[in-house]
Image (cartoon, helix red, strand yellow):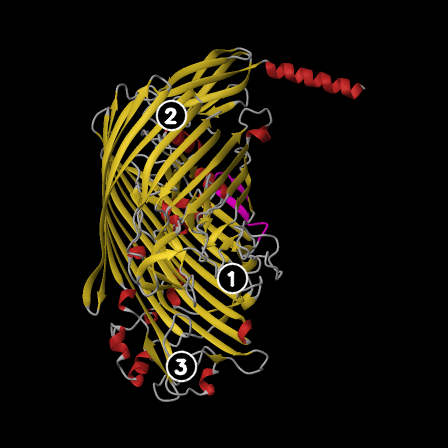
Amino acid sequence: MKPTVLSLLLTFLSTVCLAQTGSVQGLVKDAKTKEALIGCTVRIDGTQIGATTDIDGKFTLANVPAGTQKVVISYVSYKTKEIPNVRVESGNTTAIDTELDEEGKSLQEVVVRANRATNTEVAVITEIKQLKPLAVGISAQQIQKSQDRDAAAAIRRVPGISIVDNRFVLIRGLGTRYNSVLINDVITPSTEVESRSFSFDIVPSNILDRMIVYKSGAAELPGDFAGGVIKIYTKRRPDQNFTDVGFTIGYRPGTTFRTAQTHDRGGLSVLGLWNKDQQIPTSFPARANDFNALNAAQRAGYARLLPNSWGLRQVSIAPDVRLAINMGRRFDLGNTRVSNLTSINYSLTNQYADIDLSIYQNGATANDVFERYDDANYQRQTRLGVLHNWTFRFNPRFTLEWKTLFNLLSSTETLNRMGQRVIDGVDVQAFSERFENRSIVSTQVSGEHSLSELSKFNWIGAYSYSGRWEPDWKRARFQRQSDSGQPFAAVIPNQPNPIDNGRFFSTLNENVVSLIGNYEHTFGNPTDREPNRIKAGIYGEQRNRTYSARFYGYERVSNVSQEITSQPINTIFDDRNVTGQPGGLSLLDGTKDLDSYEGINTYGAAYVQGDVNLGSRLNLTLGFRGEFNNQTLRSDINLVRTDLVDRSIFSPLPSLNAIYKLNDRQNLRLAYSATVNRPELRELAPFTYFDFNLLADVRGNPSLTTATIQNIDAKYEFYPTPNEVISVTGFVKQFSNPIETFLLPTANGLGYTFINARSARNYGVEIEVRKSFANASSVFLQNLQLVGNASFINSRIDLGQTVIGPDLSGRIGPYDLTNIQSAERPLANQSPYLINAGAYYADPVSGWQANVLYNVAGPRIFAVGNQNQPTVFEMARNVVDLNISKTFKKQYEVRLGIQDILNAPFRFAQDYNDDGKIGKDVSSLNATADQNVRVFRRGQYVTLTGVYTFGRRTIVP
């Protein structure tokens, strides 16, 4: 009884005490310029109650004891201001609007310039709140907490985002073709050969300022999207002079220190480069017909010019290493403020996986195995990245910037496959030795002009380059009768094919030149919270792409002895065997004229949009964008330059964004936009190429038309404090003529093309919550932040009764889908749910930080199937990451990261029973069962990072 009474008494007393508090809110400005000051420290004297001003210069102090208080406001390079006798009443809010004066000239180390922070959580939340289109984003501050290594890993924390192959971004479950990606407001070149896809792993995270994902359209945004427009902003200019050096070592169980097989690409492979001898010698005949017209001995002579680099070697896999050097400098040249930001990143990482691969007969019973393999896959990846930015602020009305981004990535992949073709009673051993280099260079010069207090103009001139090389991808296959005890013998076909004992070379080069201009005029008082603005601009771009591929296959000359075919992979293609004489080996060129092409895409757009304020609560932004696009595709056929595609289209794209302010912290948004999705050059090209990832023939479809999308979004958003948000978004998308992959009904092998379906729809809801406890009485809670978001999406595509497409011979005609595949299904790559959650703790006094992060994406269609080849789903994986860091004396930082703690398997399964999902039974022979196709684990990943910061001197931007 006594404890109960005591607890009630304590509860009553604490309630009474807590009730005797009020709050203080206010705005801090520069006394001279009247601009809001960001990051000022505001505190109640003699207490631990404090806050910092947000991007609008506002602050809130909660739980302030009732009575008379002294408020102290401080900011670097400004005089500290004390405001005594501030009356705080219980349950009420006291308002303070004040100004700070600059310090005197005696502060030699401090130079003050007006600039708004953009890379903090508060800054990004505020930016999203002020944008007219619906958007979400992630700041450099949050990325640093999560210790994500690249843009792909970081952006998956954003609502409605999922990642494929650790590098490609899906928005609201829609494929990469439905995204537009911009770096520093310039559309990026594609990093992939056959599709419009940007590889986000190419951008290291420590050069990022923020990433904003626009979910609804606006006239100022590119119109070729349905999922979203992703804007990646790299760091612009430093807020202080600094030099940072960081070193990371990584350990992955199952990979690090294990023995694996690999192959050599030369001494420069650690930098992502390869030796010159990995390329086709310049003396080789340029065309396959000329090469194959030579006799076997002559062709063998050319074959011997290619290095015998087939041999594999055993290595003990070393720990991963990463190195980062970052430097920022600011100085004056006369009256011009000059800033430089340079970042250099290098990493060497490793990944080993044992992959279970099964191929089925897909007859009357499930799990009837046709082929079964165990793939030992080892990849070594390097990344070299450089960011180099210069800013010249000539005066408050004109700033000139030069930004350059360079990234070079390479992957050395060795696959050793052991297994059986069960139906034939044949043991199989196969090898793949692949090296891929990807690079991107983006450089731009931009200017920002304040024409007057009400008018602004900015422009960008940009050049981008994207390259991809696959030098000498070697593939070999050996086989023997099962249980025969005989040695494996090489499979040497009569004609070269992409799988058996061949060498593949490819090169992609894409050059992009862009010119952009934007004008903005504000009506009325520019300091109003919601002034009316009108914007207009142009965007011009020319994209030139060249792609060339060559592949060669070894051939038998008469009857090759078993003494040669049974030799191991390191000697079978030795010069002694490649003689071109009877009983030996020679080489054939399997390249077709259409395996190389040149594509040109010319794009021009103009837009105008304006704000209309209907009263103090409702804002409408009306816009119109017109886009012209021309696509041409050429190839040399029988030495004659031939135009394969020449297509122009103009797209009118209206948009409307409405914001209704319930109050200063709550908004209702409604958005409508019309957008398009254009076919890519390769999708239009009327020829067949071999996709080595799908192991399938893919043929373009010149009958493809541009898809149109009607987008409607509605959002409720609540901002309890500057760094908190609660939002609920609903969306509906209706597609006409959506472009989808179509599996051709072929008797042998796999063949894909692209078709226009009749229609599709995509709808769902997204929820986001960011909660902090800055005003809690507990210090622990004050340092805690919770972040969570979830998306629930439903999609359906209607192919219609017939679709128009080519067969592998190129004949265009209708396909009746009866008994071929279902006319309706979910969109490919569409996950029905996406969930992200995180708990972040940061103690500014002790320097400790820690966070736990969770991510899952629901099952989605990985490869579209038909009646003969069931659709393959990628199954859901639950991912949990843990990160801990500690800062010492503001110069040393140690970080520990443990990623993918659960180590859930990657699992790809076929929907054998055609019920649109994967059930629990994936092993029985029942007709209601499904089938596992590919299963593997990557292992947890543990990293330890040390960062040292050389002497800094604070400079307010």
Q: Which amino acid does label 2 sit on?
A: Ile
Residue that label 3 marks: 574
- Given residues 730 and 750, the one toward you in this image is 750
First in residue order: circle 1 vs circle 2: 1
Q: Residue extending furthest right? A: 1
Disc 3 and disc 1 in contact, CB within 8 angstroms? no
Magenta range is 883-904
Give percent across and percent down for residue 262.
47, 68
Q: Distance between the residues labelled 3 and 1?
A: 31 Å
Determine whether the residue tagged by mark 2 lies in a helix, strand or loop: strand
Q: Nearer the viewer, mark 1 or mark 2?
A: 2
Determine whether the residue tagged by mark 1 lies in a helix, strand or loop: loop
- Give the main secondary structure, helix, strand or loop, of the magenta stretch: strand
Q: How far apart are marks 1 and 2 (CA)?
A: 55 Å
Give percent across and percent down for residue 904.
58, 52
Residue that label 2 marks: 659
Disc 3 and disc 2 in contact, CB within 8 angstroms? no
